[in-house]
Image (spheres, grey):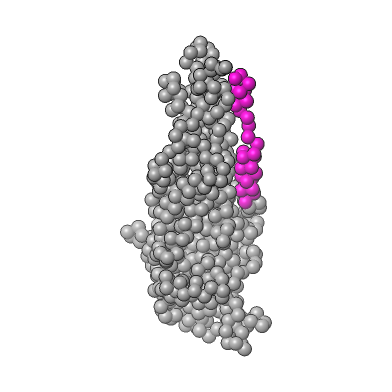
Amino acid sequence: MSTVPESRGAESCGVQEEGRRMAWWLGLLLCAVGGMLTALAFVPFDLSMCVWVGLMPLVSVLWMGRRRSGFKGFLGAFGYGWVYGLFYFGTSFWWINEVSTLGYVPFMMYLAVYPALWAGLAGTWLRPRFEPFPEARDLPLEQRKARWSAWNVRDMAVTLRAVLGCSALWVVTEWLRGWVMTGFGWNGLGVALYSGLSMAQWAEFVGVTVLSFIPVMVNLWLWCVCRRVGGMMLKVGKRPIPWDFYALCVVLMMLFLGGMFFSLQYAPADLSKKDGVSPHQTGELPVMAVQRNQTQREKAFTPANELYGDLLSATREGMESVYRGMLKATEKEGQVRVQMPAWVIWPESSLARSVLFDAETGNLLPDVFNQALLFGKGGVPALREDFGDFVLLTGGDLAYFDWQTRLPQKSYNALVAFEEDFDGMKDRRKQHLVPFGEYIPCRDIFPWLEDAFTHSAGFRMGSTFEKGDTVEPLPLRGALPGSKVGVIPAICYEDTVGRLLRRFVRPGNQVIVNVTNDGWFNQSFANEQHARNAAFRCIELRRPMVRASNTGMTVAYAPNGAMLDELRGEDGSPFVKGSLYARLPLDENAGYTLYALAGDWAVAACAVLVLLCGFLRLDVSGGSRRRG
């Protein structure tokens, strides 16, 4: 009969030292706190440091106490993760209430499924098999040190497998959230790394979704280090050397320094001084973006002539302001880099009426209304005569008209460009449509969905939009005679969908142009969240961006994601009527980034890593079993 004490027997058999499972109410409280803490890392709070600790409360619930196993254990961990997600997304996406409280509740319940799925697997299948703390008090000093040292190494190996597997799993679940049901990938944990720009630069290689690997890894690694160090302090009053923590610090420092190098390489000229020009800058494109600052309801009831009048007058005021600035700078310095805008960008849906095409031939139909108001007396030609030739880009609806039924057969939300007159219009059509914004799913099968939308939004949706299908950039003339600049079109929230915009990348001078409405959400923080998520397209593709928004934020970004300029009022609010002038840095030698070429290759690598960490478990405790 064995006389080995119970604690030594547990150690020799490699059984985990497990205490009582956490009380359910305490677990729920910790998950709620963790979810809200994570939400603080995003606009409007913008406390980015919270992203490094926001997951720890949830991990404490999943990895402390008795192990959960089987489907019942998965459901328990899933439930805790769902509560975390509910508070995480419910707090950061509170602005959806501006459109529909009826839609906000089920949408948050749906989004919370993704962190819940992560928690279900992280709390069962990928939960680390921590070894018990060794009982070595009665052993000689050298043997005691050797036993604790061996345990420390084995515990670090267990930690490494769990941390890598769970970090990769988070990336996969975030990617699913941005893809399933047309996707809504806003506010992934990687977006919180925008502050300071250094860490964010790695999106050029892996995309912003995979950047989430970094904060998840730090959360889990720190939790495991605290468990190990704290446990040893309680057991023997002495801490082990946390070599893995030091390794984590080295990795983070390398990521930071490497990101800083890339940020400076792609900085605009005034931030990266090298003979006055950034290493990747071969020219500039002066642009002006106009903002009307109207809610969706106000915009819907604005007469067409008033809408065009506001846009034209705001454009004229902006041009006059730039011209006055040029004169002052010339008088003071003699030579200035300021140029009149080569492009003027108006927001999404700025064309008051749909542009009509013949459904049978596809030809543009005569448009007396839009053409008269835009290109008639006092319109665009007058602005060009006074301030120089420019290209007008704006959002508008396109409709293919059937003469027999007198109804549109197909409708598109599009970015349209006028290099000359109205008949020379070019367009690119939106591909990533918004459910319940541009179409109602199963509208014909479930007509009650349209009634519910009308009741919630306060107005009835018009015709359903179709998807565009071309991924060719829109070629437009640049600021210099004979120059061409390719437009990567982004309509509405397409500037937050990296997997779409990467397909428009071509070598040479290119600019991302986003025309958006954002008036649906009134004066909420949705607009600033939208702009923050959009900035990562510049880093992923290394192209500058200009955004013209109907209701904040109208902003310009450099290829490193840095803000060149933004439109704000004297009180700092982005909800203001006016125009933004910016000079976008161009690079005629620009090629493809790794993300532009390979897309979400790193997400696939994370999926493989999850499987490896889940199925190829290292038996780090085998040695202790043999000694037993």
Q: Which quarter of the picture shows residue 529?
A: bottom left
Q: In the depicted view, which residue is nearer to us: 45 or 54?
A: 54
Residue displayed at 52% across by 40% down = 68
Which residue is outermost to the top?
140
Q: Main secondary structure of the magenta part?
A: helix
Q: Is residue 357 above or below residue 45?
A: below
Q: Position of residue 427 (x, y in %)?
A: 59, 71
- Residue at the image point whose x is 51% and y is 19% from the top: 5
From the viewer's perspective, tell me whether residue 81 is left or right of residue 158: left
Residue furthest left as drawn: 571
Can you see residue 386? no
Report the residue at 55% width, 83% height from top: 367
Q: Nearer the viewer, residue 343 or 431?
A: 431
Which image quarter is the N terminus in?
top right
| The quadrant where residue 13 appears | top right
| Closer to the camera in the image, 57 or 201 | 57
Residue 621 counted in the magenta span: yes
Q: Residue furthest bottom?
A: 404
In the displayed image of the protein, which residue is found farthest to the right?
361
Is residue 483 highlighted in magenta? Answer: no
Image coordinates for residue 49, horizontal then vertical, percent:
42, 42
Residue 582, x across and y down, in percent? 47, 60
Q: In this view of the protein, can residue 532 be seen by the observer?
A: yes
Measuring from the top left, give residue 56's x and y in whole percent: 45, 40
Q: Is residue 404 left or right of residue 347?
A: right
Residue at image position (57%, 84%) is 407
Work out whether 596 lies above or below 414: above
- Which stretch appears magenta? 600-628
